Image (cartoon, rainbow, N blue to C red):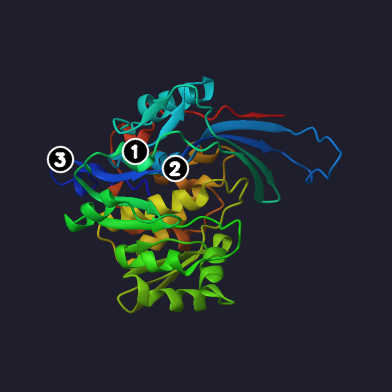
Amino acid sequence: MTLEDPCAERALAGELLHTGGGLDVFLTGQVFMDMIFTGLPFMPPPGTELITGGLGSAPGGVANIAVAMSRLGLRVGLAAAVGDDLFGAYLWRTLQEQEGVDLRWSRQVTGWPTPVTVSLAYDSDRSMITYAPPPPIDLAGLVDAPPRARTCLVGLDTPIPGWALEMRRNGATVFADVSWDPTEAWSGDVLDRLADVDVFLPNAVEAMAYTSTATPEDALEALAPRCRTVVVKCGGRGAIAGEDGVRAAAPALPVTALDPTGAGDVFAAGFVFGTLADWPLEQRLRFANLCAGLSVRHYSGSLGAPCWGEIAAFGETAEVPPETLEEYAFIVPYIPDTDLATDSVTRAEPTLRNA
């Protein structure tokens, strides 16, 4: 079978997921302008100049997951600040007009430079340099009253905002991730915040660091008592998870990775979709790995996140053996027949140039 099986009964992903009005996901965070250098033969040592074969630009930071979720047909609301410079104008237009992210809670800040991250993609991995002047406004202050949404996403690096706690009391599922701690202090306060979280999505390095464990599996066992659902992202090894005493694992999609920028965020978007679809834990992991795997085939950060057309067609490539394709048959009913599947809708393209 293929995921384009014309005999399969299909419905719009939105029709299967959306119940009533409001958003599917609400999130806040910092949006970055991502500049992605590609085609590097090696990492440049100090005092040298390296001429690269490609350069791309795309929305980054919290925009990675906002775009990825919107491309899956989810209704996404974002509270973020961007500058009023050229980068800010590009980010605003791309997110709102081309990717369909609801920015009514976001602000363009006069006189503030938009944060920038430079990503150096090399040997299926990347190094990053970031310029991030603190925003002159409190991001939590952008949300006077939380919108009606089925889920929300927060970071554990700072205390969970009041709007997220209120949304949880009103029935929303709270997803959380965590960033790399540059001080490497790995404060226990971060894990204490899991008491107000339903789903935790760290990568393996973060999970092991915060739990002082030596393997992702040990980290999962240490985190499981703190949160109902814990997912540890293991990159090319796939992902492992625990929920209500159940353990599950799923391998990464067998593709050639060109640029992993934003892949963890795309994984999270797929897991949110699977949670809203009420899939079993293993299927949620498989779909999240699928989305992430499709994204790393592109040099484009957030704009490499797959639309349904790419998800429907991924089985046609020789990269995916038939036995692997069969494991994704549960996705078929969610593949829409309309514009989302054919990718005829307007989507932003990365400003990518390769030699």
Compared to residue 302, the image places residue 352 above or below, namely above
Q: Quadrant of the C terminus?
A: top right
Left or right: 277 in relation to 304: left
Which residue sits at x=38%, y=31%? 99
Find residue 237 and report its image quarter.
bottom right
Q: Quadrant of residue 119?
A: top right
Residue marked by disc 1: 78
Mark linked to residue 21: 3
User: Image quarter for residue 133?
Assistant: top right
Q: Nearer the viewer, mark 3 or mark 1?
A: 1
Camera-nearest residue between 187 and 212? 187
Amino acid, disc 3: Gly
Residue 292 percent across, percent down from the top left: 48, 51
Q: Residue 62 — which label? A: 2
Q: Name which residue type carries label 2.
A: Val
Residue 198 to residue 91: above or below? below
- Residue at image position (81%, 36%) is 50
Report how far apart the C-alphas of labels 2 and 1 lie in the structure.
9 Å
Query: Disc 2 or 1, which lies upstream in sequence?
Result: 2
**Residue density around tag 1, few if under 14, some if 14–19, many if 20 or more, within 10 Å:** many
Direction right: furthest residue? 47
- The residue carrying pointer 3 sits among few (fewer than 14), some (14 to 19) or many (20 or more) residues within 10 Å by Cα, namely few
- Please tell me the numbered disc located at residue 86: none
In the rendered image, the quadrant that contains the N terminus is bottom left
Q: Position of residue 178 (x, y in %)?
A: 47, 57
Mark earlier in primary sequence (2, 3): 3
Q: Position of residue 266 (x, y in %)?
A: 45, 48
The answer to whether mark 2 and mark 1 are in CB contact below 8 A is yes
Q: Secondary structure at mark 1?
A: strand
